[in-house]
Amino acid sequence: MSSMGLNEIRIDHVFDEDIYGVVRADAAGTITYDFAALDQVLLPLVDNGLQPFLSLSYTPPALGPTLFGPPTSMAAWGDAVTALVSHYRDLGHSGWGYEVWNELDTDHWTGTIAQYNEMYTASANAVRAADSTALVGGSAASGMDSAGNWSGQFIDYLAENPSVPADFFSVHAYRSDAWNEGPAARKLLDAAGRPGLPIYLTEWNNVSIMEQGVGNGSDTNASVSGSSYVAKRLYRAIGSEATKFFYFTPVEGLRFNLPYNGDLGLVTVDGHRKSAGNVFEMYSELESTVLPTTITGAGSENEDVYGLVTANTKGTSVTALLWNNTENDSRMAVNLKGLPFKEANFRVQQKTVSGILGNGFADGSTEVVPVYPSANENAPVTSDTSRKPATAYEEQIVIPAHGVVSIEISPTDEPVGTISRSAEPSLTNIAAVASGASVTVSSTVEDTVKGWSATKLTDGRRHSFEFSKAPIRGWSSDPHAEPTATESIQVDLGSVRPIDTVVLWPRDSQTLHAAGFPDDFTIQGSVDGTTWVPVHTATGYTIEKPVSGPQTFEFAAAEFQFLKVEATVLTDGARDGTPAYAFQLNEFEAYRTGVVNGGFELGTLDAWASTGKATVQSVSTRSGQYAVELTGKGASVSTQVTGLLPNTTYTFGGHVRPQTSKDAATIMVGGFGGSDVSTKLSSPRWAAGWVTFTTGPTSTSASFTVSKAGSKGSVWADDFVLTQGLTDAAAGVSPSSEPEPSTKD
């Protein structure tokens, strides 16, 4: 989510007992608070540059008889809010936004408007008392014009009670490609004596239905909530009176047993970005100033075929975004004048989202694609050229049906002509059934209704869900009365394959997080299925540290056809008061990354040399448990890979997150028999960076370095890989093209 340019993530169901279990009461009625499950969701967001925005909902049994009803005691409800806000304030996370309830005008609220207003006041006072820098607001109705005028009645209450804290007014925006809610709310707020109160649209999309069938929702570029719709809608947010817009929803949230089912996420449950996610990234790459632009021609009257042009504050870089929200390709004549490149070459990069490009749905819609990222998942650079000096840029741009195109123009030292590019490196889960692997287990609970099956170990579905329409729990061995028992998983890869990484995905539902993950186990490999070589041994694994998220085990590369995880000390897989010791997993994965300790999952800098301050840490990571942090001036890490083939093209890449744009990260490759090659990333979010190089006639090794700029701040780096392949030259655009304002025909 960080890589798409998102800044805040709204979290609903915060007080829902079945989801996070924050508030509980014992038999005597004594209230206790437990933030462990909520922390597992919120703190990783914070650690990776995303700020939580919390919806204070719904009523747990400890505070009231019904989930969607008013609390029995407003004082007790206020105490719970105080405990929540204080908990995160004490962890150093002050200044968050807190929204009181969610869609009180639907069946999510069974009380009256008067009861809501009372609860809002109790909540707002509690938030303000616990954290004076926090922001609080409501009423989060499903629309300004919903039956009962709930939004209007809440604003009337604010008018009648000017001392009640309100830092923003919130409402949802569906069933439209406009933003009528902003002007409507502004008019009422001004009349209520709350002029200038920020308006947050805390849910928006075309529709709110989360199960529309494969190919619908936000599944693909042409879906009703797909990429071209999102591009148009985000543009219309400019001047809409609202200051924050929360897309519903960042990650799929309803039907988890299908890779696509017409849900509304920007990312699938199993980690593949949807085409609409690429549009968010494109918007995040726009410059800070929107330039006056003239757009004419068919489709421009309703902004279905349209765009915008932006420039940075210095006027040295220009980025345009064009979209086509129709069923046919459209040609746009782009003419930009006044560019500052009279005496210097300039670079023009184009990215495209279409029915294929930047559209993971095209790579596979009925099963989880075992390649990360999949071939067409991320919007590719489809044209990259260096142009001769000029003060104008002119081009005929074909925007695909329901497509989006970004154009970035910036200074360059590259010679005039096409700039060759390589594809982003990817990793293939060779243990997936989609990769031809098969799995056998020592014992198994087979219950498809409850979501158990050995086949789920290699089906690509990484997460477990207890409360969905079709529960997903992965695989479980038979239960045992005692923890000391032997259970195992064995995967046949189909042929001997090079491997250096195994990833075990534990159960991760809030109520049974990491249940059944073994304490003692070994990971082994074999060529013939008879003679086994241990590659990792663990003892007391769940005792030493909490098990959260994928457990990644990196080791020296070896060739195996069979992989086995044998557990000898099990943990409780039931957690219902009667222990049932079992070996349970959601997913088993295996990879060849090509870089020893490339994800730093050894918890050390083994295989890497460092300069300055370089630390392996577990706070900010892209995946797994660890990443390296480079801090201060001159910090870098480097590693050398041997055993490469001469005269062979390779791509080395990974992911970095600079703390600020001044903490730019550089990924460099040298010592391969050619000139050093590098790429620089400065955007303060997780982003992929890679360089391609070709070894010399006698070269069989290369050195890889990751370094940071600036004397302060940090850069986090993770998930480095080395792949072998050919350089793909980007489709060229004739550098003789001259450039003018923006027009479309």
Image (spheres, helix red, strand yellow):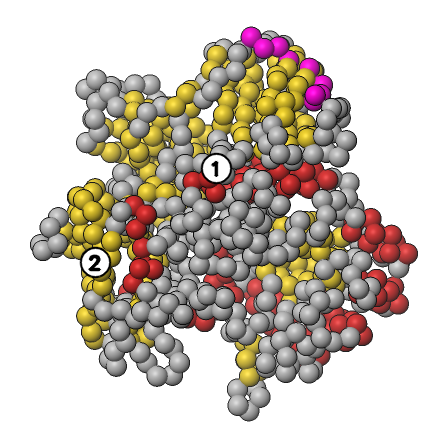
Mark 1 secondary-structure assignment: loop
Q: Main secondary structure of the magenta part?
A: loop
Residue at the limit of the structure toward the right, as seen here? 191
Residue at x 85%, y 56% (from the top left corner): 189
Q: Is residue 738 magenta?
A: yes
Q: Please, what is the three-letter code of the amino acid marked with disc 1?
A: Asn
Q: Position of residue 374 (x, y in %)?
A: 41, 40
Residue at the limit of the structure toward the left, as seen here? 531
Q: Earlier in the sequence, mark 2 or mark 1?
A: 1
Left or right: residue 629 compared with residue 253: left
Q: Are marks 2 and 1 in contact (CB under 8 Å)?
A: no
Q: Position of residue 79 (x, y in %)?
A: 65, 76
Left or right: residue 709 compared with residue 670: right
Q: Position of residue 257 (x, y in %)?
A: 44, 59
Q: Which residues are magenta?
A: 736-745
Snapshot quadrant of residue 512 = bottom left
Mark 2 secondary-structure assignment: strand
Q: Please, what is the three-letter code of the amino acid marked with disc 2?
A: Gln
Q: Position of residue 335 (x, y in %)?
A: 68, 17
Residue at x 41%, y 59% (from the top left corner): 463
In the depicted view, which residue is nearer to us: 498 or 548? 498
Snapshot quadrant of residue 64 = bottom right
Left or right: residue 247 compared with residue 140: left
Alpha carbon distance from label 2 to label 1: 33 Å
Residue at the limit of the structure toward the bottom, as seen here? 28
Residue at x 41%, y 64% (from the top left corner): 472
**Residue 521 numbered tag:** none
- Residue identified by numbered label 2: 490
- Residue identified by numbered label 1: 378
